[in-house]
Image: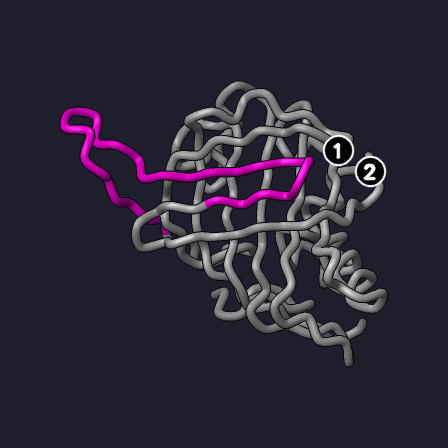
Amino acid sequence: MIDWSIEGEELANCNCNLGCPCQFGVLPTDGTCEAAVFFRIDKGHYGETNLDGLLAAGVYKWPAAIHEGNGHMQLIIDPRADADQRLALQAIMNGEDTKEMGTMWFVFSAMSPNKHDTIYAPIEFKMDAETRIGKGVASGIVEVSAEPIPNVVSGDPHRISINVPHGFEFGTAEMAKGHTKTSGGAIELLKNNGTHAHFASLHLTGQGRVGAI
């Protein structure tokens, strides 16, 4: 396998209840899974190809729980990426050069036989895990926004995080409330409104998440 490593940040929104049943081994809230995820690569490489500073996103949709398969996925890659960087990001996000079940990208790809053509579109990405405010935009394709979970009584920001020592995506993530709007691309998401979102720092390699127990 080609050696690779990525360190960066992630903002995700799915259609399930706040907290995300997947993290607890529970079936999706309404039986389906729809998600959009944005990534900022602060430091990364794929073989000799440098990936520092690039942005990417993925739009995913499964008719049932992820592990039941038959999903659709479409990747969106920063058009600033050169030819080698584009191939590298596609390989990593399609689960290539990764041990079985090593990362969420491996799982998402394995459970998505319906892979739509990668899109190269301008991407904007801002996130602050401390305040739980963030936004990711792939121009003309998909937009994700996140905000703090409100206290059910006072409406004040409610802060909660989850710890997943064995996780193949992150070890700890800040929970939030998110919204997704799709306006182009091959996959339409309609359920992501005031639903689960999270902010997480990533450190992934072809051998899995660095620090996983």
Residue holding disc 2 = 116
Residue holding disc 1 = 185
Q: Amino acid at mark 2?
A: His
Residues drawn in magenta: 135-162
Image position, residue 130 (x, y; %): 31, 55
- Left or right: 154 in relation to 26: left
Q: Answer few, some or many: residues within 10 Å of disc 1's Cα (few below 14, many 20 plus, some between 14 and 19).
A: some
Q: Residue furthest bottom?
A: 48
Q: Residue at x 47, y 42 (%)?
A: 23
- Left or right: 121 in relation to 156: right
* Placement of 137 over or under 44, stated as above or below: above
* Placement of 3 over or under 21, stated as above or below: below
- Comes first in the chain, label 2 or label 1: 2
Q: Answer few, some or many: residues within 10 Å of disc 2's Cα (few below 14, many 20 plus, some between 14 and 19).
A: some
Q: Are marks 2 and 1 in contact (CB under 8 Å)?
A: yes
Q: Secondary structure at mark 1?
A: loop
Q: Amino acid at mark 1?
A: Gly
Mark sitting on residue 150: none
Image position, residue 133 (x, y; %): 37, 45
